[in-house]
Amino acid sequence: MQTAKTDSCVACHPPRTYDSNLGRTCHSGRREESAFGRALTGFTGFLIVLASTFVAASAPPAVSNADPHRFLDDIKALTTPAMEGRGNGSKGLTRARHLIEKRYKDLGLEPAGVNGSYLQPFTLITGAQLKGKNEFAVVTGGKKRELKAKQEFVPFSFSSSGSAQGAIVFAGYGATADEFQYDDYAGIDVKDKIVVVLRYEPPSFAVKEGNHGMTRHSQLVTKAINARNHGAKALVLVSGKLGEGEEDLLTRFGSVSGPEDIGIIFAQVKNDVAAEWLKAAGKSLAEMQKQIDESSKPASFEVGGSQSAAVTVSIKTTRATVDNVLAYLPGKSDEYVIIGAHYDHLGRGNFDSLAPSQIGQIHPGADDNGSGTAGVLELARIMAPLKGQLQRGILFESFAGEELGLLGSAAWVKDPTRPLDKAVAMLNMDMIGRIKNEKVYIGGIGTGSTLKTAVEQAAANSGFKIEYSPGGYSSSDHTSFVAKKIPVLFFFSGLHADYHKPSDTWDKIDPEPAARLLGVVASTAEQLADAPERPAFQVVAEDKPAGGSGSGGYGPYFGSIPDFGQVENGVKFSDVRPASPAAKAGLKAGDILVEFGGKPIKNLYDFTDALRRSKIGQVVEVKVLRDGQPVTASVKLEQRK
């Protein structure tokens, strides 16, 4: 399951490229979907049972029960050291793909990929590498000092590549915070200059926010966008005051998430390096920080004199070709039900890990999402004998690229290997292996006219306490389908302390209740596949959600759902929430936002920053590209509730 990094986390964890308006939050910014429904009981339940007797003659063929031992064995196989945590672009992911592909083939399921295969390849960005020239030099009084790469300075992985040379400006914390009447850039000209800023933010920000932790102004991406928007050529971060026992360490390259290119050269230097620059101007780095912290007022200045800096950064974006694995169980018609799960995970961690000290160790992902993957394989096994017996077919989909932004499911709905209009519903499983106290979460129940009835009948004798949610948007692959107006169901057993850590291991899986849940999924899928009528897609007018890229964890509400595929410039909307400010302004699915309030929008991080600098009730002029043509709209931002 994809981590939803939001601006409420620490400075090194900005938002991921999707809207966590759409899901549940934990430490990483994910939020559990709210329960808007509960299972029918008493007399209503009796009526459902009674009604089912009248359709018994048309009930779908029975299948064998899911086997908890086979289910657990598949999770073990998917989490061996050879699988390397199934990181995108790794050999381990390829081994997992082979396992899934072979299983589908052995079951006699038809290939449903491209060119008669079980595979649908697509390319994604896996990270970045320092390549070529990476240099930093400072000239003081005609004397040049070269900094040592990775020892005295290091670029951030989302820095622009290129060279910058100019005067040095100290800009405090690099914050422009209108809500706190504070601006480090007020009264100074940083255009085409090298700006030096401190880590974190003035302590007064947290106090004014009610001591709920640091604000968005502490985040590295926010600092970079702000410096870029003020015309700086490069931004240099220094740690500043260190905590007790803390070392002045450079950030490991690639350990901080961000866009592919933030639009400005961005690097970190050691405290003692920056202290020398300020000392030459008769200033002390430590004293300047103390002054800002105590006064809550900016103290920015140009270092001036004969001092200047020159920095060159060369970064190569790394890409990989990965595969969705697809198999088909034919029915009597060309319509079909999708059963899916993502099979990728975090590999050895990196910025997605919630155990930063253990980055580099294999993150096996037994529950996330070895459990969902094993669930799809087990359902394929028990449903394979139904070939040709159901009114509709079953398409089994195993996605790659989910942890990097739902990219596998986005790739499939963009270039579907079967007609998209024949898809009746999509059933997604993501983390189903650790059911506690018989509690199960099922989302998307309101996206199809018959979904809740089907699930309730399937779960009638399961023993589960089911918590329903009507909306179909959250932080897993079904979101890509609901954006295409396909009804969805999302099966989930809940978050736990091992989520996105090396400790998410197979021995913590509880296979028996998971197998019972697979029975619920199988029965639901059969009902949908054999029902006389397909469920009608329904738009769910969800509560204005808290949190999220593109619309913020606090502040004004916009209402767009970003497309999880990659666009070169701007933010593409996969959907717009009903009755939202964006919808009222006439914005539509497929629009690409390129300007917000006069500021260019190159990526979701720019959108997040621009929106959070806006106010509730403000009317913002936006520009989108619609079918390649510019369209402007006035959006009145609302309060989120």
Image (cartoon, grey):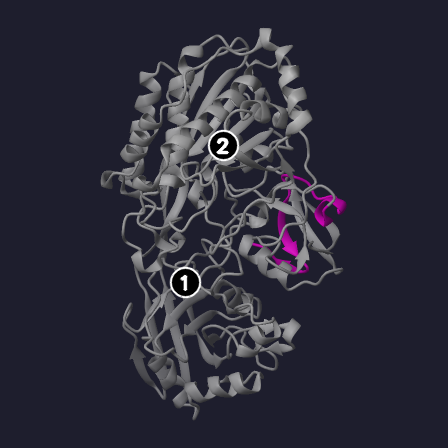
User: Mark 2 and 1 residues: CB-CB less than 8 Å, in contact?
Assistant: no
Q: Which residue is mark 1?
A: 162
**Total numbered badges shown on the rendered structure:** 2
Residue 283 in the image: x percent, y percent? Answer: 44, 90
Residue 638 in the image: x percent, y percent? Answer: 73, 55
Q: Residue at x 51, y 33 (%)?
A: 464
Looking at this view, name the residue that lies furthest to the left. Answer: 82
Foreground pick, 100 / 499: 499
Tell me the kind of residue under disc 1: Gly
Tell me if 94 is positioned left or right of 489 in this view. left
Question: Distance between the Cα atoms at labels 2 and 1?
Answer: 43 Å
Q: Which residue is mark 2?
A: 428
**In the image, which disc is placed on residue 215?**
none
Looking at this view, name the residue that lies furthest to the top. Answer: 57
Quarter residue 618 falls in: bottom right
Q: Residue at x 48, y 80 (%)?
A: 169
Q: Can see residue 116?
A: no
Residue 527 in the image: x percent, y percent? Answer: 56, 18
N-terminal-most mark, 2 or 1:
1
| Quarter placement of the N terminus | top left
Tell me the kind of residue under disc 2: Asn
In this view, 441 is above or below 222 = above
Quarter residue 575 falls in: top right
Which stretch did the figure color magenta?
580-602
Question: In terms of secondary structure, where does tag 1 sit?
Answer: strand
